[in-house]
Amino acid sequence: MTTTRSMRPVTTVLHARPTVEGAGVHLKRAFGFSDVPLFDPFLMLDDFRGDTPEQYRAGFPWHPHRGIETITYLLEGEVEHGDSMGNRGVIGPGCAQWMTAGSGIVHQEMPAGDEHGRMGGFQLWANLPAVEKMRDPRYCGVEAEEIPIVEDGDAVVRVLAGSIAGVSGPVNDIVIDPEYLDVSLRPAGVWTHPTTPGHTVFAYVFAGSVCFGETPTGLAADGACFGDGSVVLFGDGESVVARGTADGGRFLLVSGKPIGEPIAWRGPIVMNTDDELRQAFEEYRDGSFVKHDAGGRS
């Protein structure tokens, strides 16, 4: 449907803020701890694009996660990955990694730039409901050629999760029923995409500029345009409509089913209560944090 009643309005606009994480990685945070529960079921989105190796190569040495899923999508450079399930490998340009930490995983992510020193990509954290927080961990590595590319009107879309025009992405069986699309809009092109009512939907613009919203004719409004580093949260509805400006635009479109549960969050661990949080860190200190056997790859 494309009536104005079905279109999702823009309700919140944030701008990615510089921060330093890991062992000294300079990145931009689109949203995070201070924005919970606005983006439920999503907790955090980091944009780690950069062209100065000294600002990213220290990486993210071994650290734990519990109670969440981490989704890494790379545009440029490489990230070497290792974890307590025995997974080892390199995430290259156009590749993705969907890791369900569940009951607990320890891993490291060590970035390396391309021949020009460029590194670029995104990491999204998604929450898990209470009944899934202590499930077995799962690792899903996705090669670039496994991600379908769909031409949909004025847009070219890489489908990591969810579906578009009858084509589904390689990541499935995720509890929050996510959609994760990398959308490139042609200059002045208009694109309308159906969304599931009741789901949280946001866009992150990372190239050019994109207009979201509606006018009486059903097209994205000229006055609601957003550039690189803008995160746009939508209200409820049955579709998102976007228009590229004269130079076109590129953005992530992400959606998922809200969880609506209490959140206790400290560092890399997200539980429902402070007691669960304390227990997780005590187990990490005493060596009983990891509860799985090696081999949790899907």
Image: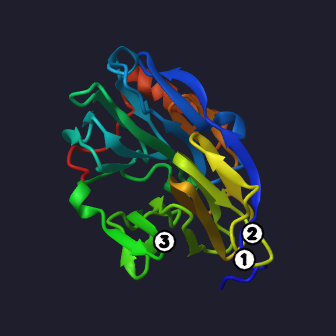
Secondary structure at numbered mark 2: loop
Screen quadrant of the C terminus:
bottom left
**Residue 124 in picture, x, y percent from top left:** 49, 45
Q: Nearer the viewer, residue 13 or 124?
A: 13
Give, as a three-letter code, the residue at label 1: Gly
The reply to whether residue 230 is in sight is yes
Left or right: where 60 falls relative to 195: left
Asked if the residue under mark 2 is in contact with the one under mark 1, i.e. CB atoms within 8 Å, the reply is: yes
Identify residue for label 1. Answer: 218
- Mark seen at residue 154: 3
Give, as a three-letter code, the residue at label 2: Glu
Asked if the residue under mark 2 is in contact with the one under mark 3, i.e. CB atoms within 8 Å, the reply is: no
**Residue 268 in picture, x, y percent from top left:** 50, 32
The reply to whether residue 86 is in sight is no
Give, as a three-letter code, the residue at label 3: Asp
Judge the density around disc 2: few (<14), some (14-19), many (≥20) Cα neighbours within 10 Å.
many
Secondary structure at numbered mark 1: loop
Report, in whole angstroms, how far the alpha carbon at label 3 lies from the one at label 2. Answer: 17 Å
Instruction: Say which residue appears at 63% left-offset and 69% top-offset.
Output: 240
Instruction: Say which residue appears at 51% left-offset and 37% top-offset.
Output: 46
Identify residue for label 2. Answer: 214
| Residue 170, image quadrant | bottom left
Judge the density around disc 1: few (<14), some (14-19), many (≥20) Cα neighbours within 10 Å.
some
Report, in whole angstroms, how far the alpha carbon at label 1 lies from the one at label 2. Answer: 5 Å
Left or right: where 217 falls relative to 184: right
Instruction: Say which residue appears at 57% left-offset and 64% top-offset.
Output: 188
In terms of sequence position, does the residue under pointer 3 or pointer 1 come before the other? Answer: 3
